[in-house]
Amino acid sequence: MRRELNFSKEGQAELSRLFDRLLANLQTTAVGSGQAMNEHVTGERWPSKRERNERLQAAAGIIRDLWSGKLVSRDGPIKVDEARIHTLPEEPPRLAVGALSPETAEWAGHWADALITINQPRKSLREIIDAFRRGGGKGKPLYLQVHVSYADTEDEALANAFDQWRSNAVPAAISQTLRLPEEFDGACTKVRPEDMDQHVRISANPSRHIEWLEDDTAMGFEQIYIHNVGRNQSEFINAFGRKVLPKFNRNRDDD
């Protein structure tokens, strides 16, 4: 079945600019330690967080060597036998590490090129930023992915967040080990709609979303990726293209 998305002229223009910016930002690659649901299908034992961090840092080193044109071989923790990239990028992409806790952010500060995290309470975000800088990330870029739920009414925005995103209310220490969608369903049976404000920025008021984003930029996040968790993507793109993102157009030429 074919489904078409229809946007207003303002929304179409904003979507075009969005794709331009996405393509321009391909010089950044984000890496993380993974989730069991994505990776258990290989049939290997799911490693501990410490092991996953070791593999992540080793992988980052392999990626950098490949991007520099080296012939790469490794015995472990990730085995590589005489790998080489023959068509090299003009400039090696930046490696941003995904971190949800101060501990991970501090550990990655000395080897990652940038930090990317998700919306959390301001206190938690500040602790993550401080830890990254303390670990060696001072002066390195900070990126943020924000999960929002926008709709015509507050009730609809809340309903969309609860319907589509309640599994993300499961603590990361638990969600990283879950292997099947059914396990996520079971883990979030006690999540209530009123719990969603901790995980999603829920509002039908564009001005409230502008305030949140202004606070993000004030904290030092130089790139912010906005993800509407509901299925009403046309409505979201049209509204944010007309009422939210133009407030930040003044920064577009500087990025």
Image (tube, rainbow, N blue to C red):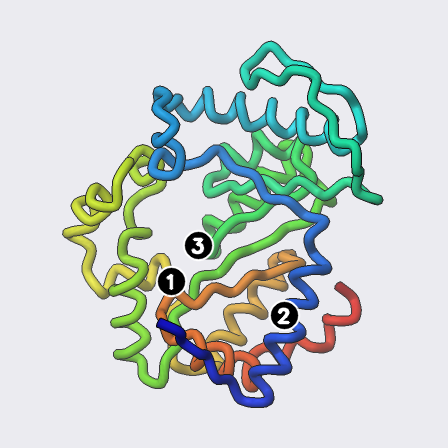
Number of the label disc, if any, that sits on residue 120: 3
Sooner in the amino-acid sequence: mark 2 or mark 1: 2
In the foreground, 38 or 119:
38
Number of the label disc, if any, that sits on residue 200: 1
Q: Residues within 10 Å of mark 2 (few under 14, many from 20)?
A: few
Q: Is residue 217 left or right of residue 104?
A: right
Residue at the image point whose x is 51% and y is 84% from the top: 7
Number of numbered tags placed on the structure image? 3
In the foreground, 201 or 14:
14
Which quadrant of the figure has residue 164?
bottom left
Query: Which dot, 1 or 3, sits closer to the camera?
Result: 1
Q: Is residue 3 left or right of residue 186?
A: right
Residue 66 position, x and y percent, is: 73, 29
Residue 224 position, x and y percent, is: 59, 61
Number of the label disc, if any, that sits on residue 18: 2
Q: Amino acid at mark 1?
A: Val
Q: Amino acid at mark 3?
A: Gln
